Image: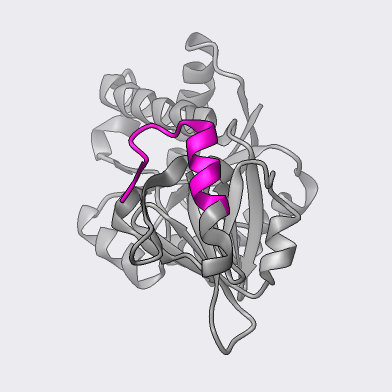
Amino acid sequence: MIQIYICEDEKIQLEFWKRTIEEYIKSANIMAEIVSAHQNPQDILDDTERFEGSQSLFIIDIQMPEYDMNGLELARRLRDKNNDYYLVFITAKDDLAYKVFEYQLDVLDYIVKKPKYYLENADTVPVTERLNRIFYKISQNQNETEKKKIQFGSGGRKYNIAIEDIIYVQAVKGTHLVEINIACKKIQVRQTLKEIAGQIDMEEFLFVNKSCIVQKRMILSVDKKNRRVNLTGGYQVEVSVREMKKVCKETERLGIRNAVHI
């Protein structure tokens, strides 16, 4: 069940979004419900303390001049509490989208509101089409979340990473950090390699040296001469003399597709 929060400072517009979204989730037979709809951003924050344990979709107006915080600030505070939610902004000024980058917000979509939406008997087809797009994105993301994940903390942020997406994990020399490498992204977290190894199935991973584990199916080739493995994504990792024999034996045993020994 997706819990929907709506924050819009204009009462007439708030009622429009409530009514439109309620009608949409009913007609589209979507497992969702509006649990909170307020003009005041603080009321939304307060309600997040009461409704927990389910996925949340926040639909937030960016400009709210009558209150102490605008939609961007509300979204930032939500992010600081927990980044496991969906965020959609509604705004009359699409040029405000660049502000999202300043606040480092991960936004699912935008709805550019138009005055005609709030007229009696207004055509809501454009809004319905946008809601179709939003809930399609959510369904796609839910399919991704079915993957087995582990959670890592980095500073004040939390990351949920699908184990099958991890290419390799390596201790950062001279620090108490480890670097988790996934496609096109590196995340440093304050954990030990031993702690991470305890969170994953080590039948799927392999130590290539005392400071690095790689996911076996990510190995493309083993360069015995230069003592390294070539991994998915163009990564190369050093293999210790002690581990080279085991690495070659394991890739041969598993018959990893495309894995060759040079």
Q: Is residue 259 left or right of residue 69?
A: left
Q: Position of residue 176 (x, y in %)?
A: 64, 82
In the picture as drawn, the residue positioned furthest to the bottom comes out as 174
Q: Residue at x 54, y 34 (%)?
A: 253
* Residue 206 x/y as whole percent: 59, 52
Task: Give the left or right position of residue 1, taking residue 169 as reference.
Answer: right
Residue 247 position within the rendered picture, expressed as x and y whole percent measured from the top left:
52, 51
Q: Quadrant of the N terminus?
A: top right
Which residues lie in the magenta part? 246-262
Along the line of sight, the residue nearer the viewer: 218 or 163: 218
- Decide: is 64 above or below 47: below
Q: Does 252 lie within the magenta span?
A: yes
Q: Nearer the viewer, residue 70 or 133?
A: 133
Where is residue 73 shown, x and y percent of the image? 49, 68
Q: Nearer the viewer, residue 9 or 130?
A: 130
In this rendering, the answer to whether 35 lies above or below 200 is above
**Count of numbered circles on the image:** 0
In this rendering, position of residue 238 left or right of residue 84 = left
- Is 5 located above or below residue 135 in the figure? below
In the image, is residue 69 part of the stretch drawn in magenta?
Answer: no
Q: Residue at x 55, y 42 (%)?
A: 250
